[in-house]
Image: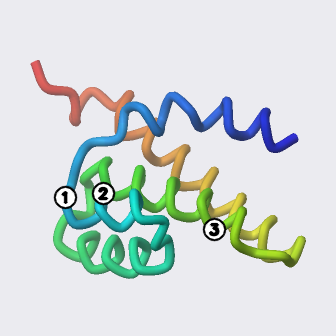
Amino acid sequence: MKKLILFSLFPVLLQGQDIPKLQKQLNNANYQKCIKKTKRYAKWHKKNKQVNYYFSASYFGLINEENSFNKNLANLNKSLRYLAKFYRYTNDRRFKTQ
């Protein structure tokens, strides 16, 4: 099951755009701190698809840290919700650069 989820998120992890402070927290596996900084960043950049990428990757990373099934399920749901938003903004013509 975990492998299936990892393979479904793998393309997103490769496509993530680099916001240096958020990427640093993600690389260091500081997922809670990355979520906190992403929320702060999202206040000013609401329609930026990068925000959804970092939310999705952070919540996915929290799955490995939690021992509770309910918390893992909640984090997975949040990760997939932000993943859907990421793809929606990616496929929306208004956000494509030409």
Instruction: Look at 51% across and 28% down and name the residue there.
Output: 11
Snapshot quadrant of residue 35: bottom left
Residue identified by numbered label 2:
23
Compared with 23, 14 (above or below) is above
The residue depicted at 35 percent of the width and 76 percent of the height is 39
Mark sitting earlier along the chain (3/1): 1
**Mark 1: few/some/many CA within 10 Å (<14, 14-19, 20+):** few
**Where the N terminus falls, by quadrant?**
top right
Say which amino acid is labelled 3: Leu
Q: Which residue is mark 1?
A: 20
Q: Is residue 97 above or below residue 6?
A: above
Tags 1 and 2 in contact by the CB under 8 Å rule? yes
Pinpoint residue 41: horizontal percent, then vertical percent: 24, 72
Q: Residue furthest top?
A: 98
Q: Which residue is mark 3?
A: 62
Within 10 Å of disc 3 (Cα), the crowding (few <14, some 14-19, many 20+) is some
Decide which of tag 3 and tag 2 comes sooner along the chain. Answer: 2
Q: Amino acid at mark 2?
A: Gln
Secondary element under disc 2, as helix, strand or loop, is helix
The alpha-carbon separation of the residues under discs 3 and 1 comes to: 20 Å
Label 2 neighbour load within 10 Å: few <14, some 14-19, many 20+:
some
Q: Residue at x 27, y 80 (%)?
A: 40
Q: CA distance from mark 1 to mark 2?
A: 5 Å
Where is residue 17? Give x, y as percent: 27, 42
* Residue sticking out furthest to the front: 28
Q: Secondary structure at mark 3?
A: helix
